Amino acid sequence: MTDLALGLETWYAHLVYVLLVAIGLFVLINDENLVKKVIGLNIFQTGVFLFFITSAYRVDGRAPLVTGSGPFVNPLPHVLILTAIVVGVAVTAVALTLVVRIYGEYGTLRDDVIRKIRDDEAGPAATDREGAS
Amino acid sequence: MIDHLLPLLVAAPLLASALPLFVAVRSRWLARWLTVTALVGQFALAAVLAWVVYATGSVSYVVGSIPAAFGIGLFADRLTATLGLLVASGALAALLTDDGSRSGPEYALWLLFVAGLSGVVVTADVFNLYVFLEISGLAAYAMVASARGVDPALAALKYLLVGTVGATLYLLGVGYAFVATGTLAVADLAPGLAAAGHDSTLVVTAFVLMVLGLSVKLALFPLHAWKPDAYAAARPTVATVLAALGSTVAGYALVRIVYDAFTVAFFEAVPALRILLVVAGATSVVAGGLLALRARDVRRLLAYSSVSQFGLFGLGVALATPLSVTGALVVLIGHAVAKGGLFVAVGSVARRHDATVVEDYAGLGDREPLTAAAVAVLGVSLVGLPPTVGFAGKWYLALGAIEAGSWLVATVVLASTMLSLAYVGRLVERCYRGGADAASPARLSTDGGRVRAIAPVIVVGAAVLIVALGLGSSALAAWFEPVVEGWL
């Protein structure tokens, strides 16, 4: 269904996809700010979405309308990603709700500060968590 | 009606999930019973499906009569029916142990979770699998967060971040499989991936990403860190459904993807990935067992034990012999029943005696002989001793490993028995031999009496089921035989 020669036509799109996925995962893992973690997750997901959209491309492709004339781009990945975007929005909404609740409790968005507060509160009982964080 | 059984299995709980939301404004009692009724209906649907599958073989369904290549395909065989029954009965049993003070949205989430899991179970489309995985995932994050305090919010956020990365990695794998084959239907993927060449970079990448994504949901070591936090922070009933059903359904998805889409020919073409999966499984078995040994909180102990058990499941899938795959399926079902029962017991003990760490279980055998005995039986199944279903699972796994000539795996299966004996032993020994220093009288629960009445019944029921499945393990293996034969 996809022409391998497309690899050359769309190499820059693939580059952007790899960059977005890498940047997103890096921010998600590396940043201590919870909101930025959620943003990282969004960037990561957007990269994956871009990969799908790239796969729909074809040279001189047009929008797949019944009245139009081909060649058409593949509409299926677009439809899939519309669904995936909706899923992503729902995930972001739940994540931000949780962040608001955590902020309300600790007054900070920084994961390292929260961890420190919790360790101080827990005191000797902190060993309960077996250091698994 | 019977013709539309498969879509109903998803649509019924999905539509019903809207009801408690509105009804609860007027009456929480009614919302609860609506939810219970919906789950009883779900169980009935799953039971009819099991009967249909038993009588006529596997069933396919195409939504709206659009060909499966473009449309929405659903599929059910004996394994599907078993998982469908497990999801409905597990969610129902866990809800019955609840004290009935839940809000409308919580009941709605419960049904959404069931709808998502049922969707994963019946779908025959790898993209829809992602959507259903996320529906059940989102419901699970919100359910964990619905407990009071800030711990559940932190645990749920961690669960969400890790779980979403896992699901998105799976989606990326779907993308690669789609680029390689141009289809998303599982039935078309098998010939498509073979035509693209099992050892081609595209197909290998698709496999690695899809399996990696599902491993996060399975919580294989070292992708397990979300699990103990989520189980310990969630309300007991939520922990029960998550422990019994969440990862179990992800395991089902894994075995479907591996054997229905990629098929065993993929493992033959790329043996290195098979070895990698064996190593991941073995690491999970050992690491999960060791972490469980160190855990103080019983819920964390059980979560780490799940890491170990899903490692066993992964081993069985990776070995790809009929016996080992049967073993993996038996482990999957047995673990779900045992963990569900144990978490009901843990929840009931936490409410009645305010006990959450292993030391607090001292003297439980005197205070609650029935619950303690059931905990012992369920624990024995995790260890894998006869006559429980856990023994049957490990027995098939070990035989499969020997059949495949993999002595390393056979050793790991045996070592897992030793490790789990050590951590389950800690708990059971406390129950029966720690009575001397447990002078504190049983603290009685302050919430509804319903908990006290029904929880022990369900725990004992789970224990009876574990032994029944163990004694009837050859029947269980025979039930799965057509499915496994179709794969290998």
Image (tube, coloured by chain):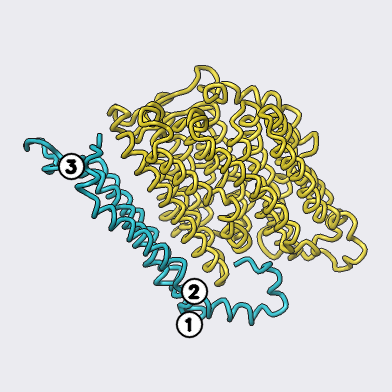
What residue does disc 2 label?
A102
Judging from the image, what is the letter of the chain drawn in cyan? A
Residue B363: horizontal and vertical position, in percent?
86, 59
Q: Of B175 and B402, which appears nearest the observer?
A: B402
* Local SS, label 1: loop
Q: Residue at x 50, y 19 (%)?
A: B57
Residue B399: horizontal and vertical position, in percent?
72, 29
Chain of the residue displaying label 3:
A
Chain of the residue displaying label 1:
A
* Local SS, label 3: loop
What residue does disc 1 label?
A107
What residue does disc 3 label?
A58
Residue B62: horizontal and vertical position, in percent?
34, 28
Q: Of B105 and B276, which appears nearest the observer?
A: B276
Q: Is residue A23 visible?
A: yes
Nearer the viewer's eye, disc 3 or disc 1? 3
Q: Of B205 and A120, which appears nearest the observer?
A: B205
First in sequence: mark 3 or mark 1?
Answer: 3
Judging from the image, what is the letter of the chain drawn in yellow? B
Tell me the CA gap for discs 2 and 1. Answer: 8 Å
Direction from residue B175 to residue B20 in the image, left or right: right
* Local SS, label 2: helix
Q: Is residue A113 above or below residue B413?
A: below
Q: Residue at x 46, y 61 (%)?
A: B161
Q: Give amino acid for label 2.
A: Ile
Q: In which quarter of the image is the N terminus of chain B?
A: top left
Q: Is residue B117 above or below residue B261?
A: below
Q: Give amino acid for label 3.
A: Arg
Whether callout 2 and callout 3 share a subunit is answered yes
Asked if marks 3 and 1 touch (Cβ < 8 Å), the reply is no
